[in-house]
Amino acid sequence: MDDPLELLSLNSFQRFILYQKLPSKYNLDPQKTLSISKTNQTGLRLQFMNSQEILARNVEGEKTWENNIDEQVGFRKVIDKLVETKKPIVGHNCFLDLAHLVHKFIEPLPTSLEEFKKTLVDNFGPICDTKYIANASGQFASLETLGLSSTSLQDLTECFKTLAVPLDFGKRKKNEGNEVFHDAGYDSLCTGHVFLGLVSRMRKDGLREAVNSFLDGTHDLSGRLYVMNSDFSYINLTGPELIPDRSCICHLSGFPAQSLTLQIQKSLEQAGFPLTGTTVYWINQNSAFVRFASGENAKIAKDVDEILIDGCGCMIMMYDDWRKSRLENSASIPEKRKSMDFV
């Protein structure tokens, strides 16, 4: 094999000329072929090679290409292994994480909660949410006596550091010496510790048996996902949902984007709605849910055509009426334009 000649910093026209002209001019020796290959975005390597050398180079190139593809697959391998083995998944407040997991690695998010639950159950093993476990069945009340102020991952981690739980809370993380929450590796470590800490406090039998009851999906608190800012207590992956009473909720829409909660409350009061015990839950900049103290207060919406908010006429409907209207409208929307329906 002759020594290569490397040409650096060629423009596209120069590279075009070399590719077009050099082979016809220099490939005269049947035993050798002029090989032209790229060294980078702008450089070329010229080298005379025989057929065996060209074959070896092509084999090496294919191997490099396969290695690059394998490297680019990356975390996909972990997801595929989880799907294949149905190993249990333990997360903390992991509903949104699971939605991203499905959307990025399994399929586009389905259009209903039931379809989403089926996708999770069909593809993955038992799922445990430590946020839900910590809030369920009086767990938080018992942990409050230990000084726990919330069920955030950071607070739970600190709480279980002080308990007589046989866990090693050594600082194994990317930035050694600094506790970096919201770093994927460290959060995973802490979630595992919190899971074992919670199970250890709840167990009636041995720790191994208690852990297994969660990880095999047989425990009552397994397969339930904590939901933030919702009147759902949790999402039940393996059974029907407990639908909350929404007779005291109305849907308000059509107000200007610059409207404030105080303006909405004042307009509701002027329209005859009692404000005591009333809460506004924003959906987006132009719509919101309004929870009244009672269903009787919400029924006033049936007699109100519109509410004037910041100079705009806005529509208010009882939740059941709004829900029915929304389902009727969604029937005419193309499937690909529908969004996941949790309400």
Image (tube, helix red, strand yellow):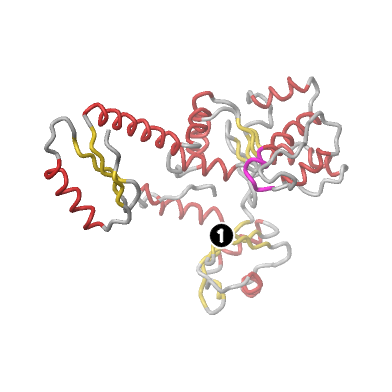
Q: Which residue is most to the front?
A: 3
Q: Nearer the viewer, residue 247 or 89?
A: 89
22 lies left or right of 170:
left
Q: Residue 258, image x and y in percent?
A: 56, 74
Q: Is residue 45 visible?
A: yes
**185 is higher (above) or lower (below) than 83:** below
Under tag 1, what secondary structure? strand
Q: Is residue 187 magenta?
A: yes
User: What residue range appears in magenta?
Assistant: 181-188
Q: Is residue 106 visible?
A: no
Q: Residue 174, image x and y in percent?
A: 66, 43
Q: Is residue 78 magenta?
A: no
Residue at 48% of width from left, 30% of height from top? 80
Q: Residues within 10 Å of mark 1 (few under 14, many from 20)?
A: few
Which quadrant of the figure has residue 143? top right
Residue at 28% of width from left, 56% of height from top? 10
Which quadrant of the figure has residue 198? top right
Dominant secondary structure of the residues highlighted in magenta in the image: helix
Q: Nearer the viewer, residue 54 or 50?
A: 50
Q: Which residue is most to the bottom?
A: 311
Q: Residue 44, image x and y in percent?
A: 29, 48
Q: Quadrant of the N terminus?
A: top left
Residue carrying label 1: 283
Which quadrant of the figure has residue 290? bottom right
Q: Nearer the viewer, residue 205 or 286?
A: 205
125 lies left or right of 142:
left
The amino acid marked with disc number 1 is Ile
Looking at the rendered structure, the number of numbered marks drawn on it comes to 1
Q: Residue 148, image x and y in percent?
A: 82, 46
Residue at 65% of width from left, 24% of height from top? 218
